[in-house]
Image (cartoon, coloured by chain):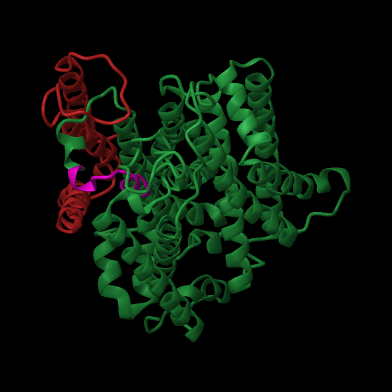
């Protein structure tokens, strides 16, 4: 039986996913399939909410097995690590690009 | 080893990579580091000069000074080829491990972690390959801020994010018990292992909880795995007016292709580890035979799908489709296409099918050669899916694509980096689950 903590984490993840997708889809008025993301419409940062939702919902597996403190540490590592990849890539490449 | 703790011979053999480090290892890592530095230099070169240093500009329709993509050419080249290759490799990894757990295939538990780590190192390489291809990686944050749900690039990012996070969590949970055990067996790293095990108690309840959680995670991972490569296929299949890609079987074609290349990669790894550490008693002939059996079956399905795809588009397809096929069969890429079909797929198929017709002829070494050929072949296959279609838009042909040394060095860099990360993992964690010894 999953614990209350696991269920709560799972529900929070689901909520973030639904919120992210809803904001992402509803705020977008275009319907054209394009191969690159165009900065035009949609709720800003909605994709990030969706991605955070994915991370949180998957972390329910960790919530089910780890003590609370350790779980929170892991969640922090996953979220910060994910964002750090973007930050590092963007900082390094913008320093090099002419 | 902790005072008072005696390792069995089998345990000691299994932990060889962690306990012993020879000169050969340092030399190997040194070479990998040098190659990685060369890769970083080439990437720096591309970033500072732009994609004009690649072969993705059209080389005979447009002069060199023309901007990337302006005169046609192939805006996707070996970077996107390598992206699909790494996604394919990553596929089988965690999927094999999940299947072992879900179907209780305990015999194959010896290769489960090798497969999981393969996914872990392959996915970042796939993501990096996209970063190489975009002209302005400094705008990557736009994906998170402005990304549009209609953009296949966002689907890619969603799929990779989900798969990567699931892999990290799955690998950690399957590794946690072993990490705790390692603290006992390798006292000089006790501090590190103890912290990483995060208060693992090792009680029966704890073990059971991990087992159940992993089982549920495995249930989630299998559909994620199918989704990831289907999404990759949709990046092509949903592209407007692009001959060679608009196909209803593309998703399954890509998924099966990924499974073949992934299983081939796991076989190659299993054989290399068995040979390197003399693990014949752990990775038995029977295990290798079982993997080769799976490899053979999925390869046959893949060849069938390939023939079905080629036949449908070439025999009665629209003229643009026929032109793409012609480009491959008789045109500038025929010297790649025919060796790919005959050597890349034909020879491995013969090697893998031989034990079916001639009993007791399974050869682990020969199958290893077949698995390596298959992996190279699958990289080339992805190239032949991407480039000819881009060079043949509906109205005219836009030149030919030949990758430059810079591009090739950057792509090879992902391989050096992947091997380096894998080697580092093997030196820190056991590449075979410690449970296998108990079993």
Is B365 magenta? The answer is: no
Direction right: furthest residue: B358
Q: How many labels does the image show?
A: 0
Q: Taking the image as drawn, is residue B29 in sight?
A: yes
Q: Taking the image as drawn, is residue A1 in sight?
A: no
Residue closest to the eye, B83 or B333: B333
Image location (x, y in percent) of residue B158: 30, 34
Is B132 magenta? The answer is: yes
Q: In this view, does A39 lie above or below B411?
A: above
Main secondary-structure element of the magenta-colored stretch: helix
**Residue at 84%, 54% in the rendered image:** B361
Q: Report the side of B176 relative to B358 (left or right).
A: left
**Residue at 71%, 52% in the rendered image:** B289
**Residue at 37%, 40% in the rendered image:** B163
The colour with which the image depicts chain A is red
Question: Quick one: which chain is green?
Answer: B
Instruction: Point out the image quarter for the N terminus of chain B.
Output: bottom left
Residue closest to the eye, B297 or B185: B297
Stretch in magenta: B129-139
Indicate the quadrant where residue B151 lies.
top left
Residue closest to the eye, A43 or A60: A43
């Amino acid at each position: 039986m999953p614990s209350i903590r696991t269920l709560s984490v799972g529900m929070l993840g689901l909520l973030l996913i639904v919120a992210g997708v809803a904001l992402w889809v509803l705020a977008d008025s275009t319907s054209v399939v394009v191969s690159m993301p165009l900065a035009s419409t949609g709720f800003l940062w909605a994709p990030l909410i969706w991605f955070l939702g994915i991370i949180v919902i998957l972390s329910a597996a960790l919530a089910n097995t780890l003590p609370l403190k350790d779980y929170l540490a892991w969640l922090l590592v996953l979220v910060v690590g994910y964002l750090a990849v973007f930050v590092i890539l963007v900082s390094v490449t913008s320093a090099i690009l002419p | 080893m902790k005072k008072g703790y005696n390792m069995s011979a089998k345990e000691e053999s299994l932990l060889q990579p962690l306990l012993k480090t020879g000169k050969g290892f340092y030399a190997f890592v040194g070479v990998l580091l040098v190659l990685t530095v060369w890769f970083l230099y080439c990437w720096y070169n591309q970033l500072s000069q732009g994609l004009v240093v690649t072969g993705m500009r059209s080389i005979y329709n447009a002069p060199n000074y023309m901007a990337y993509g302006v005169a046609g050419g192939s805006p996707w080249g070996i970077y996107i080829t390598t992206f699909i290759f790494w996604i394919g490799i990553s596929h089988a990894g965690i999927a094999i491990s999940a299947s072992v757990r879900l179907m209780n295939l305990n015999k194959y538990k010896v290769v489960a972690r090798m497969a999981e780590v393969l996914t872990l190192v392959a996915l970042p390489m796939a993501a990096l390959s996209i970063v190489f291809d975009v002209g302005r990686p400094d705008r990557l944050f736009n994906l998170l801020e402005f990304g549009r749900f209609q953009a296949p690039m966002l689907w890619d990012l969603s799929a990779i994010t989900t798969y990567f996070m699931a892999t990290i969590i799955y690998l950690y949970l399957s590794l946690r018990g072993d990490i705790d055990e390692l603290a006992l067996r390798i006292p000089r790293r006790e501090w590190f292992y103890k912290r990483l095990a995060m208060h693992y108690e090792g009680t029966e309840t704890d073990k059971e909880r991990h087992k159940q959680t992993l089982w549920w995670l495995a249930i989630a991972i299998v559909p994620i795995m199918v989704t990831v490569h289907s999404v990759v296929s949709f990046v092509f299949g949903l592209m407007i007016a692009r001959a060679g890609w608009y196909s209803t079987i593309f998703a399954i074609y890509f998924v099966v292709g990924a499974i073949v290349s992934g299983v081939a990669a796991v076989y190659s790894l299993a054989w290399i580890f068995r040979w390197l550490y003399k693990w014949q008693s752990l990775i038995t002939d029977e295990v290798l035979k079982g993997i080769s059996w799976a490899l053979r079956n999925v390869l046959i399905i893949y060849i069938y799908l390939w023939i079905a795809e080629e036949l449908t588009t070439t025999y009665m397809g629209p003229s643009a489709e026929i032109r793409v096929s012609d480009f491959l069969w008789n045109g500038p890429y025929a010297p790649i296409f025919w060796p790919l079909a005959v050597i890349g797929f034909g020879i491995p198929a013969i090697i893998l099918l031989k034990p079916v017709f001639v009993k007791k002829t399974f050869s682990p070494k020969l199958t290893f050669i077949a698995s390596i050929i298959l992996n190279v072949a699958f990289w080339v296959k992805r190239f032949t899916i991407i480039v000819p279609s881009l060079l043949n838009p509906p109205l005219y042909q836009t030149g030919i694509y030949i990758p430059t040394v810079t591009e090739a060095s950057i792509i090879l860099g992902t391989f050096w980096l992947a091997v380096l990360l894998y080697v580092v993992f093997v030196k820190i964690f056991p590449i075979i689950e410690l449970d296998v010894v108990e079993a």
